[in-house]
Image (cartoon, rainbow, N blue to C red):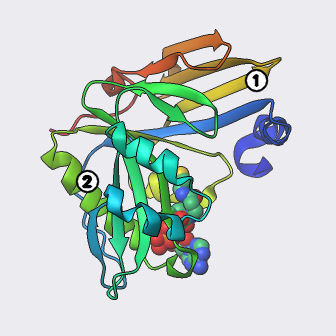
């Protein structure tokens, strides 16, 4: 952690444990055609309200009400099932005003851009390329919906996820962060343009962090739109 992200990342982690500061790296890029295949046979599909009970078996920490709320708000969750029908992986995406749970603030991806979040593979199915298989299905699904850009937010210490996003040409574009002091949330978004000074910056302070940080003009932030 210290080697890869420096002293500031270590401080951010300590402040995060104390519940005062949360930092996530924003990664993203064009929705490309992928051809990653898992090492096991999988069936893909979309989560519906009927699957919420089963989803909570895969994700025991999930609150069924929150999951139903996400679906009600129009967020979509794609799932992978093993050959015998067990739900083994999921990923979520949505647009419009979305809460970044870990940071406790809101972002708002615009202009045919989706926010990807809460990707998960059951522990005993990890290392088998399940996430790549599901992402291949997701990108095809998003392209059919006319979505051209995606962004996600990754905890700086999540090396597995960061390695995966780098390999898939989803560079780190910047960060989203939130300070929580005396009941107030100061949230901040900054996106770089290939090493130049931040192109997009937004920062808001509010009692509940409810004002959304807009994510737009991403093609200037090092993200190329597909030809
Ligand atoms: C990140 C995650 C979705 C990757 O799913 P996956 O299907 O295991 O992905 P892969 O099969 O491509 O494996 C990814 C890496 O994990 C490593 N790995 C292998 N076996 C593993 C195991 N039993 N447990 C964990 N990781 C393992 C692989 O070696 C691979 O490393 P590599 O990229 O250097 O080859 C999964 O690890 C996960 O659900 N993690 C917890 C939730 C999370 O962090 N979500 C992302 C939030 S941004």
Label 2: element kind: helix
Of circles 1 and 2, the one toward us is 1
User: Is 83 placed above or below 191 here?
Assistant: below
**Mark 1 Cα shell of 10 Å, populated few (<14), some (14-19), many (≥20):** many
**Picture quadrant where residue 180 is located:** top right
Report the front residue among 150 and 207.
207
Q: Nearer the viewer, residue 41 or 172?
A: 41
The disc, 1 or 2, on the residue closer to the chain's N-terminal end is 2
Q: Residue at x 41, y 56 (%)?
A: 91
Crowd class of label 2 (few under 14; some 14 to 19; many from 20; radius 10 Å): many
What residue sits 78% from the left and 36% below the top? 12
Beta carbon at label 1 within 8 Å of ligand 1: no
Which residue sits at x=65%, y=11%?
205
Drawn side of residue 145 relative to residue 49, left or right: left
Residue 92: give x, y in percent of width and height.
40, 50
**CB atoms at circles 1 and 2 under 8 Å apart?**
no
Image coordinates for residue 25, horizontal then vertical, percent? 58, 38
In the drawing, what numbered circle is on residue 180? 1
Name the spot of residue 9 as percent of width and height, x first. Answer: 75, 39
Residue placed most toward the observer, 65 or 75: 65
Q: Which residue is mark 2?
A: 139
- Ligand 1: image quarter: bottom right
- Label ID, residue 208: none
């Amino acid at each position: 952690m210290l080697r890869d992200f420096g002293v500031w990342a270590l401080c951010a982690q300590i402040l995060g444990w104390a519940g005062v500061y949360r930092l996530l790296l924003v990664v993203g890029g064009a929705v490309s055609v992928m051809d990653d295949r898992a090492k096991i046979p999988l069936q893909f599909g979309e989560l519906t309200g009927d699957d919420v009970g089963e989803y909570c078996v895969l994700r025991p920490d999930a609150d069924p009400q929150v999951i139903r709320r996400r679906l009600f708000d129009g967020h979509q969750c794609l799932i992978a099932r093993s050959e015998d029908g067990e739900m083994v992986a999921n990923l979520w995406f949505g647009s419009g005003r979305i809460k970044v749970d870990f940071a406790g603030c809101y972002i708002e991806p615009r202009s045919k851009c989706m926010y990807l979040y809460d990707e998960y593979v059951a522990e005993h199915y990890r290392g088998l390329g399940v996430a790549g298989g599901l992402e291949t299905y997701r990108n095809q699904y998003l392209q059919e919906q006319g979505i051209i850009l995606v962004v996600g937010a990754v905890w700086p210490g999540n090396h597995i996820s960061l390695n995966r996003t780098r390999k898939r040409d989803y560079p780190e574009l910047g960060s989203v962060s939130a300070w929580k002091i005396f009941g107030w949330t100061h949230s901040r978004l900054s996106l770089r343009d290939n090493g130049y000074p931040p192109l997009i910056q937004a920062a808001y302070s509010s009692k509940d962090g409810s004002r959304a940080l807009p994510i737009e003009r991403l093609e200037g932030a090092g993200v190329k739109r597909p030809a």
